[in-house]
């Protein structure tokens, strides 16, 4: 974790803010994964949108790895798993 100082005060909250944002956006996919898994159908899910989204998340993950940014790596690893699961279920159930 990178520590920054401003007027002698430690500003770790910037990194914490990143973790909180990552948790919120990543967990937003969980209800859809659960719903699709239970119902065994992908009605209303756009396949092209999820293909593009999964590719974008993969690129964000690579970017985070290149920056060595733990919040970006963690968030996009989990998001890739969840959104990839949605895409796979969509393709399987349709």
Image (tube, helix red, strand yellow):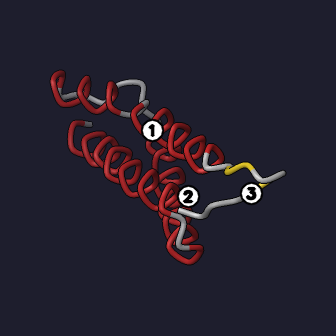
- Dot 3 or dot 1: first in sequence order is 3
Query: In the image, which disc is placed on residue 43?
Result: none
Residue at the front extreme of this rendering = 8
Query: In the image, which disc is placed on residue 23?
Result: 1
Name the side, left or right, on which 80 lies relative to 70. Answer: left
Q: Position of residue 58 (x, y in %)?
A: 47, 63
Q: How many marks?
A: 3
Q: Quadrant of the C terminus?
A: top left
The Cα–Cα distance between marks 1 and 2, rounded to whole angstroms, is 18 Å
Compared to residue 63, the image places residue 30 above or below, namely above
Q: Secondary structure at mark 1?
A: helix
Q: Secondary structure at mark 2?
A: helix
Please state which of the two labelled residues, at mark 3 or mark 1, is closer to the viewer. Answer: 3
The Cα–Cα distance between marks 3 and 2, rounded to whole angstroms, is 33 Å
The residue lying at 45 percent from left, 55 percent from top is 76
CA neighbours of label 3 inside 10 A, class few (<14), some (14 to 19), many (20+): few
Query: In the image, which disc is placed on residue 5?
Result: 3
Please state which of the two labelled residues, at mark 1 or mark 2, is closer to the viewer. Answer: 1
CA neighbours of label 1 inside 10 A, class few (<14), some (14 to 19), many (20+): some
Say which residue label 2 marks: 56
Q: Position of residue 30 (x, y in %)?
A: 32, 31
- Dot 1 or dot 2: first in sequence order is 1
Q: Position of residue 77 (x, y in %)?
A: 38, 57
Compared to residue 14, the image places residue 70 above or below, namely below
Please state which of the two labelled residues, at mark 3 or mark 2, is closer to the viewer. Answer: 3
The residue lying at 53 percent from left, 44 percent from top is 49
1 and 73: which is toward the camera: 1
Dots 3, 2 in contact, CB < 8 A: no
């Amino acid at each position: 974790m990178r520590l920054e100082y401003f007027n002698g005060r430690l500003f770790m909250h910037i990194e914490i803010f990143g973790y909180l944002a990552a948790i919120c956006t990543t967990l937003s996919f969980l209800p859809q994964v659960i719903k699709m898994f239970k119902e065994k159908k992908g009605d209303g899910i756009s396949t092209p949108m999820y293909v593009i989204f999964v590719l974008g998340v993969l690129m964000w993950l690579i970017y985070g790895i290149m920056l060595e940014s733990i919040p970006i790596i963690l968030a996009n690893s989990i998001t890739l798993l969840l959104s990839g699961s949605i895409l796979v279920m969509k393709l399987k159930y349709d």
